[in-house]
């Protein structure tokens, strides 16, 4: 029996693939600021840096969100009966939101992408279009996961209740019959 993706699953699959591709485009451009708002390119080093070059640990979290989203879609397409404790849609929603927050942090506070050989020099870092598109893609993973959760009829409250330890649950009353 061949299964089709629900709309939420399709959204996070496409968004995850887009985020993966965007990680290889330049997110930051480095230059020497002449006048305010202008960048003069330096030919001494590659002036643009992608997510892999500019960010240290963040690409690992982005890849985790991508792998979970793609894996969840493949599980659905394969017709697998495996039911993990945390539904893949919920994991995709949370990891997509985390990826969006991490990208946003680096947009607000860009990393120091100047080469170590030129330490001490003042460089301006400008954000490039792919980082904005990556933010949208990460939000797409989160939105797709949230929508897929709705399509499955699950919520974070239901997941938390199911994961709650038996020791913390209130004791059941014995019926007197």
Image: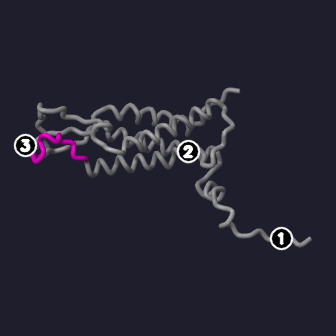
Label 2 sits on a secondary structure element that is helix
Q: Name the residue rendered at 34%, 49% in the picture.
A: 104
Image coords of residue 33 (percent x, y): 10, 43
Q: Whole-Å distance between the Cαs marked 3 and 1?
A: 78 Å
In the rendered image, the vertical position of residue 2 relative to residue 56, given as above or below = above
From the image, tell me which residue sits under label 3: 34
Of the 4 image quadrants, the one containing the N terminus is: top right
Q: Decide which of tag 3 and tag 1 comes sooner along the chain.
A: 3
Q: Is residue 121 magenta?
A: yes
Q: Decide which of tag 1 and tag 2 comes sooner along the chain.
A: 2
Mark 1 or mark 2, whichever is nearer to me: 1
Left or right: 102 with respect to 53?
Answer: right
Q: Residue furthest top?
A: 2
Image marks 1 and 2: residues in contact by CB distance under 8 Å: no
Q: Whole-Å distance between the Cαs marked 1 and 2?
A: 39 Å
From the image, tell me which residue sits under label 1: 174
Q: Residue furthest front?
A: 117
From the image, tell me which residue sits under label 2: 147
Image coords of residue 42 (percent x, y): 11, 34
In the rendered image, the vertical position of residue 110 relative to residue 40, given as above or below = below
Left or right: 26 with respect to 171?
Answer: left
Left or right: 162 with respect to 65?
Answer: right
- Total marks drawn? 3
Image coords of residue 151 (percent x, y): 62, 44
Label number found at residue 8: none
Q: Name the residue rendered at 43%, 39% in the picture.
A: 63
Mark 3 or mark 1, whichever is nearer to me: 1
Q: Whole-Å distance between the Cαs marked 3 and 2?
A: 47 Å
Q: Name the residue rendered at 66%, 43% in the picture.
A: 83
Q: Is residue 41 magenta?
A: no
In the rendered image, the vertical position of residue 177 relative to residue 63, given as above or below = below
The magenta span reads 111-122
């Amino acid at each position: 029996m061949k299964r089709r993706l629900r709309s939420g699953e399709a959204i996070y699959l496409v968004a995850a693939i887009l985020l993966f591709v965007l990680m290889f485009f330049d997110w930051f451009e480095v230059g020497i600021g002449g006048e305010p708002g202008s960048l003069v390119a330096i030919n001494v080093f590659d002036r643009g840096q992608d997510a892999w070059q500019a960010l240290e640990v963040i690409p690992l979290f982005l890849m985790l969100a991508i792998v979970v989203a793609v894996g969840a879609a493949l599980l659905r397409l394969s017709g697998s009966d495996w039911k993990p404790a945390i539904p893949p849609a919920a994991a995709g929603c949370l990891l997509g939101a985390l990826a969006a927050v991490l990208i946003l942090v680096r947009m607000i506070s860009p990393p120091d992408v100047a080469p170590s050989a030129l330490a001490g020099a003042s460089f301006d870092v400008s954000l490039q279009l792919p980082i904005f598109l990556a933010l949208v893609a990460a939000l797409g993973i989160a939105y797709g996961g949230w929508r897929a959760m709705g399509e499955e009829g699950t919520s974070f409250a239901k997941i938390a209740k199911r994961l709650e330890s038996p020791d913390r649950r209130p004791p059941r009353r014995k019926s007197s019959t």
